[in-house]
């Protein structure tokens, strides 16, 4: 399993793609097209939003699990784009139990964020949260519903009974017609049909036959609805436990949990961020690291590495390894601060506070580590790195609580140092 150990955007796409050639299935188990992965293969760059990164690996079967929410228009736009570039997408499987992002979910998401004003969460406006809310309220539309028009119509009617009241009376928007939504959704039925499968059965049979299955989280640990910086979180569980419910695979069948860590820290959207930088160092990290959201197009907030968050991610996910990405971005700093603890109300705190208020007021306690100026992008082994870069990695490993088994020294698929094999 691969998942983000910070606030997302850690480089999960590259890590998944790197392993994709060695695994039989790559599974997205939560989230929707609010996630974004950039994968560089040779001189080609691919931006994936909904599709599993393994779709770029020949011989690998990409799977969209039941825990994912699917916008059909985005799905086919992404598939068409890959097909035009010669990527074979025919092996994709989509769970019949995955929920559909409907047009009214997108509308509700956008008008709600505008209504909240300064109190907005910072959603992507793509209907993710409202779709998960419908799922929990048992008025959601699933992929399988597209194949029974009567059931689909009943479910859309049930969902719009309340939503139209809110749209017209609270937000002063026009009511959405049931027939229009049903017609739009049914138009995707035939196009989706070749991909729809009982993915729970497929994945469990694959594991029983000793196939290698890789689970891919869409967002980071600190965006988890239960374990993240609530309420500035996503609407699903990108942590390790989410893979079990989002793919239908028991926890005893997951043998390795790899956390993706950026060598510094970023986040997109609102919410507390103790190590955030507002100076020229923050601008340099943003510029050198190309820190702009793949899906949102928003500049990412940048800060120094936060070991408190890394330790928390290790504990919550039961991480066995880390994949450290973007170490090359830190080249050129004489000294690199690392957050080793927080100061809250004058007290030193070394673990993530459970209180939202405490975390909001947390001030980073930094330890300074010597930097390096040598170009590390050509390094093929750990010993190729400058001593100070090696010491930086070792320090992060000790502070984070799990071994660092791979290091990204550039954006390309081959710009990775593998210390211990993941497979």
Image (cartoon, rainbow, N blue to C red):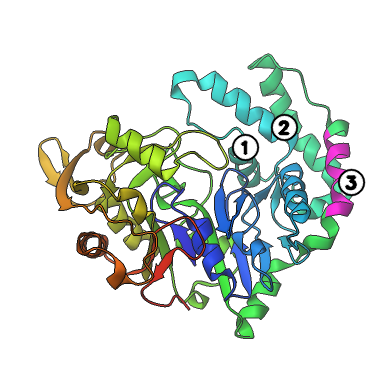
Q: Of callouts 2 and 3, which one flags the residue occurring earlier in the amino acid sequence?
A: 2
Residue 384 on the magenta segment? no
Q: Label 1: which residue?
A: 130
The secondary structure making up most of the magenta span is helix
Q: Label 3: which residue?
A: 150
Q: Secondary structure at mark 3?
A: helix
Q: Which image quadrant is residue 154 in?
A: top right
Tell me what residue is drawn at x 44 percent, y 20 percent.
118
Q: Is residue 229 visible in the rendered structure shown here?
A: no
In the rendering, which numbered label is found on residue 104? 2
Find the distance from the CA under tag 2 to the CA under tag 3.
19 Å
Q: Secondary structure at mark 2?
A: helix
**Cβ–Cβ under 8 Å for marks 1 and 3:** no
Tell me what residue is drawn at x 73 percent, y 39 percent.
102
Q: Residues within 10 Å of mark 1 (few under 14, many from 20)?
A: many
Residues drawn in magenta = 181-191
Across and down, in percent, residue 207 comes to 61, 80
In the picture shown, does residue 205 fall above or below 44?
A: below
**Cβ–Cβ under 8 Å for marks 1 and 2:** yes
In the picture shown, does residue 22 fall above or below 293?
A: below
């Amino acid at each position: 399993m691969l998942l983000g150990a910070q606030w997302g955007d850690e480089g999960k796409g590259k890590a998944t793609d790197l392993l994709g050639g060695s695994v039989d299935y790559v599974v997205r188990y939560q989230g929707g097209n609010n996630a974004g992965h950039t994968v560089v293969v040779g001189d080609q760059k691919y931006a994936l939003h909904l599709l599993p990164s393994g779709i770029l690996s020949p011989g690998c079967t990409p799977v969209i699990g039941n825990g994912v929410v699917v916008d059909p228009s985005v799905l086919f736009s992404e598939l068409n784009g890959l097909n035009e570039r010669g990527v074979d997408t025919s092996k994709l499987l989509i769970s019949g139990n995955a929920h559909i992002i409907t047009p009214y979910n997108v509308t509700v998401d956008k008008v709600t964020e505008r209504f909240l004003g300064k109190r907005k969460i910072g959603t992507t406006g793509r209907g993710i949260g409202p779709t998960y809310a419908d799922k929990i309220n048992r008025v959601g539309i699933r992929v399988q519903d597209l194949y029974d028009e009567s059931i689909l119509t009943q479910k859309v009617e049930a969902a719009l009974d309340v939503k139209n009241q809110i749209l017209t009376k609270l937000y002063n928007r026009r009511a959405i017609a049931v027939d229009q939504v049903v017609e739009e959704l049914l138009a995707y039925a035939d196009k989706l049909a070749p991909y729809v499968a009982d993915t729970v059965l497929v994945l469990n049979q694959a594991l029983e036959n000793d196939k290698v299955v890789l689970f891919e989280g869409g967002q980071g640990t600190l965006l988890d609805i239960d374990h993240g910086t609530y309420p500035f979180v996503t609407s699903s569980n990108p942590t390790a436990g989410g893979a079990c419910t989002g793919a239908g695979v028991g926890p005893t069948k997951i043998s390795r949990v790899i956390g993706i860590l950026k060598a510094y820290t970023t986040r997109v959207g609102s919410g507390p961020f103790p190590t955030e930088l507002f100076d020229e160092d923050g601008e340099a990290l943003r510029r050198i690291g190309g820190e702009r959201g793949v899906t949102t197009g928003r500049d990412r907030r940048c800060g120094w590495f936060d070991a408190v968050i890394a330790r928390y991610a290790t504990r919550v996910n039961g991480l066995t390894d880390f994949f450290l990405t973007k170490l090359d971005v830190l080249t050129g700093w004489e000294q690199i601060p690392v957050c080793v603890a927080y100061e809250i109300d004058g007290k030193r705190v070394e673990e993530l506070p459970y209180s939202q208020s405490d975390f909001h007021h947390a001030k980073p306690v930094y330890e300074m580590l010597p930097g390096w100026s040598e170009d590390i992008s050509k390094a093929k082994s750990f010993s190729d790195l400058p001593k100070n870069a090696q010491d930086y990695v070792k320090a992060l490993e000790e502070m984070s609580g799990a071994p660092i088994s791979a290091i990204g020294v550039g954006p390309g698929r081959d710009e990775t140092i593998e210390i211990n094999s993941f497979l």
